[in-house]
Amino acid sequence: MKHLKRDYFVSPFALTPQMLLLLSSLVYFVPFVTGGFQYVDVSRRKYDFIYHAGTGYAIALSLSCIAAAMLVFMPRRQDFEVEGDVRGESIIIIVMLVVFGGISIANPALFSASKADVLSSTGRIQYVFYNSCIIGMVFGALSGWKKSRLVIILSCLGLMLTLYIGHRSSVAIAILACLYIRYRNISLLLIRKRYIIGGIGAFFFLAVYKAVYAAIKAGNFELVGQKIQFDQLSDSALVGLEQFVTLAHLDLVVKYDYTLPCSNLWLVPLSLFPFSDTVFGKDGCTYNEQVQPFLFPGYSGGVAANIWAEFFANFGYAGFPLLVVILSLVCVAVEAIIRNVRSATLKAGLIVAIVHLTFYIQRKELLGAFISAKRAVLVALFIFGLVYVHRKCFPPASAEVMPQGARALRRDNG
């Protein structure tokens, strides 16, 4: 019984996938307490949003579903022990960071102050580089910083580069993945105050950075200075806090009982296959394509989605428990795989996938979240596969192939 308890039961405040989903939901639902917000599009037209009372009931139902899932899906303790050719995997990660990072640096469009130019020039090479940076950080956390100094240094430099390009998500996902490793089996209540302060500081920095990164890339440091003045910091942070815009999606579908004319959810199982997004596309039925013109007219750029709004627009209130069940079952399966693999790289890729499916999913559609998670896993599989093939083609020397006399001499010399 003691062994069973040690193996299965963790603190109810441990950072399980359900806890990650709960925390991310609270972060993205918190704007509701403000009652509404004002949105200004690129043409300086103003739109006032007052959150509907029904949105509050939807939020309460979704949080209740997550809480129920935390009781139903009682998790086993996670196993983060790694074995295998850690050195070989670290070499491949270093090579990928250097090669794909160099190719990305050579792409001038990525350094444009226009987010549209950055997104249009972002391809598979950039996705491999971004995911390699994240996986490198998580790999270092799993295998130990003493064994992975160069991997961690290059990964940090790569994350700084992705931040400069304009992608805050890579830094946030890397931090959350490392926190998952640290607090997956212990209570979050044990977090030291300085770590909490540091986390709040990082969150605030990432929020403010969105308001100034275009000016930084354009070299307009006078504008940057204005944006980060004390009396402007709150406004700059609000610009970077997409929670207000994200929650507006849910408010829309609840207020108007909006139903999507079509859905691409049927593509989710197919998204698990490599390059499926190229073969099948997104069927022209993405949530954003259908909702953004109605919710944010006149805005030409992309606006983050809302996973709860997507499921409400497809299934009504039944969509909330359905979504929680889907994510919980998938995460249970992913955690089982993490527990049974010993490669640090494979574990890292799967951990990043969990973060995509529990935390970062709040601003995505389900199909987009699965594609993002798949990319991380494919990069990890590629690294592991190269090391595996190398070991099979060039097996390390073992005692079994040593001459008999040599083995005897080795035993005699202790």
Image (spheres, helix red, strand yellow):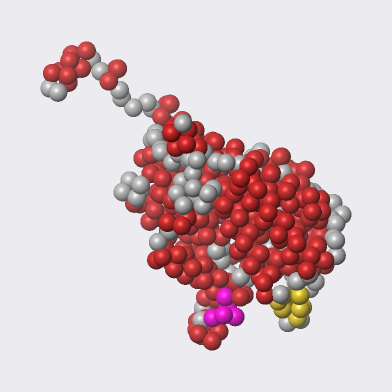
Can the viewer see residue 117? Answer: no
**Residue 212: horizontal and vertical position, in percent?**
55, 76
Q: Quadrant of residue 36?
A: bottom right
In the image, what residue occupies the spot 74% across and 52% down? 320
| Residue occupying the far top of the picture | 404
- The C terminus, quarter of image: top left
Nearest the viewer among 210 and 19 is 19
In the image, what residue occupies the spot 46% across and 57% down? 189
Can the viewer see residue 182? Answer: yes
214 vs 148: above or below:
below
Q: Which range is magenta?
A: 233-237
In the image, what residue occupies the spot 76% across and 46% down? 265
Nearest the viewer among 333 and 368 is 333
**Magenta span main SS:** helix
387 vs 235: above or below:
above
Asked whether 178 falls inside the magenta stretch, the response is: no
